[in-house]
Image: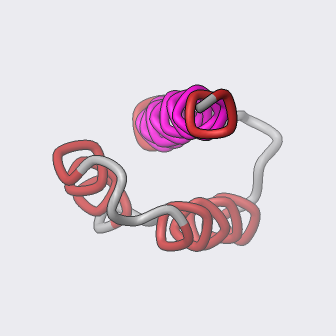
């Protein structure tokens, strides 16, 4: 019984951490679109967008609404 409880608790933490990761990517992409760091080149901004998309793609299936928002922001890639 304690093994099942540990699994559920661990899964819950992982799920929350994944949601935080999605929210972080949304926030970062939104910031880059609205007010990119002044010292970032166009190439650096594109690299970040591509990397963020790879991260989101690896955790798809967690939260469709947040994933759609990430996709919307990715379409604004510089």
User: Is residue 5 in the magenta section?
Assistant: no
Q: In this view, does 48 lie to the left or right of 57?
A: right
Relative to the observer, which residue lies in front, 58 or 9?
Answer: 9
Image quarter where the N terminus lies is top right
Question: Which residue corresponds to the image point at 67% horizontal and 67% vertical from the top-left?
Answer: 51
Q: Where is residue 13 in the image (x, y as percent from the top left)?
A: 60, 28
Is residue 2 among the parts visible in the rendering? yes
Q: Residue at x 47, y 42 (%)?
A: 22
Q: Does the magenta stretch include residue 11?
A: yes
Comparing 8 with 41, the one in front is: 8
Residue 39 in percent (x, y) is at: 82, 41
The answer to whether residue 32 of the structure is visible from this angle is no
Taking the image as shown, residue 26 lies to the left or right of residue 38, namely: left
Residue 11, quarter of the rendered image: top right
Scheme of image coloration: secondary structure
Residue occupying image coordinates x 33% and y 63%? 61
Q: Give percent across and percent down for residue 44.
A: 75, 62
In-front residue for pair 2/49:
2
- Residue 74 lies left or right of residue 37; in this view the side is left
Vertical arrangement, residue 31 with respect to residue 18, above or below: above
Rendered location of residue 45, percent (x, y): 65, 59
At a point 58% along the width and 26% down the height, the residue shown is 9
Relative height, residue 47 to residue 15 (above, below): below
The image shows a total of numbered marks equal to 0
Q: In the rendered structure, which segment of residues is drawn in magenta?
A: 6-30
């Amino acid at each position: 019984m304690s093994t099942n409880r540990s699994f559920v608790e661990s899964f819950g933490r992982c799920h929350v951490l994944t949601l935080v990761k999605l929210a972080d990517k949304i926030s970062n992409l939104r910031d880059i679109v609205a007010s990119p760091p002044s010292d970032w080149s166009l190439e650096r901004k594109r690299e970040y967008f591509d990397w963020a998309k790879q991260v989101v793609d690896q955790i798809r299936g967690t939260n469709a609404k947040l994933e759609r928002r990430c996709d919307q922001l990715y379409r604004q890639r510089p």
